[in-house]
Amino acid sequence: MTMAAAIDRRTAGAPARSRAGRIARVDIVTDLAEAQSAWRALEDEFATPYQRYDLLGHWQSLVGARENAAPLIAIAYDGERRPLLLLPLAVKREHGVRVARFMGGKHTTFNMALWDSEFVREATAADLAEFLSALRAKDVADVLVLTQQPRHWHDILNPFATPPKQPCANDCPVLSMVPGDPPQNRISNSFRRRLKGKERK
């Protein structure tokens, strides 16, 4: 079973965001350094630990590049040039077509876009359609594959998990970890027995 531990985000001192406009433009960035400013602005707002710039930057240089996967980072901005969402993808030619997937490959447990915390609460199907239409117009990939997405993150609906989709074998379970709780409380008795059996073998 795949799990993720929910961790706290630093949002207490975040400045209020303007609600002026929805998606005014979508930029495609192929250089991680060029996306860093917008990426870091959003990673502490609404993102899983697996979409952090430092983690995926290392993955891209150590794994993605060797697998011929090129960075494809789509960033949506509002009319005041504030980032609303960032979709960290890697594109690779497979069976003759350009397939864009979440960066991180099999090394990431949960996959999500990074969102402005206000925008993610208000995002509509029309916003998603506008974003995807902009990606389509830029002709950066033939197929968009968005797998292993949690339906909710921190009790907020993940907008990219709402369109029609195929059921996923990995339903993205979350393990809630209580600070100071002993490690044995995080593992069920049956799982502990299986681990001991494997250890004996």
Image (cartoon, grey):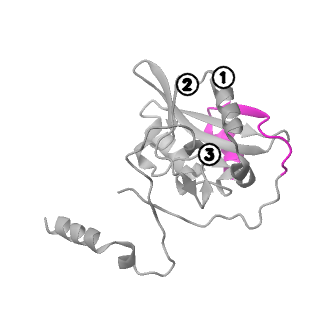
* Most distant residue in the front direction: 164
As measured in the structure, the alpha-carbon distance from the residue carrying label 3 to the one carrying label 1 is: 22 Å
Viewer-proximal residue, 60 or 8? 8
**Tag shown at residue 141:** 2
x, y (%) of residue 116? 71, 51
- The residue identified by callout 3 is 159
Could you say whether the residue bearing mark 1 is in a helix, strand or loop? Answer: helix
Q: Residue at x 26, y 70 (%)?
A: 190
Q: Which residues are magenta?
A: 18-40
As measured in the structure, the alpha-carbon distance from the residue carrying label 3 to the one carrying label 2 is: 21 Å
Q: Residue at x 52, y 52 (%)?
A: 50
Q: Residue at x 48, y 72 (%)?
A: 177
- The residue identified by callout 1 is 138
Q: Residue at x 47, y 34 (%)?
A: 65
Could you say whether the residue bearing mark 2 is in a helix, strand or loop? Answer: loop
In terms of sequence position, does the residue under pointer 3 or pointer 2 come before the other?
2
Tell me how many marks there are.
Answer: 3
Work out whether 52 lies above or below 67: below
Q: Quadrant of residue 57?
A: top right
x, y (%) of residue 4? 46, 60
Disc number lying in front (3 or 1): 3
Viewer-proximal residue, 165 or 189? 165
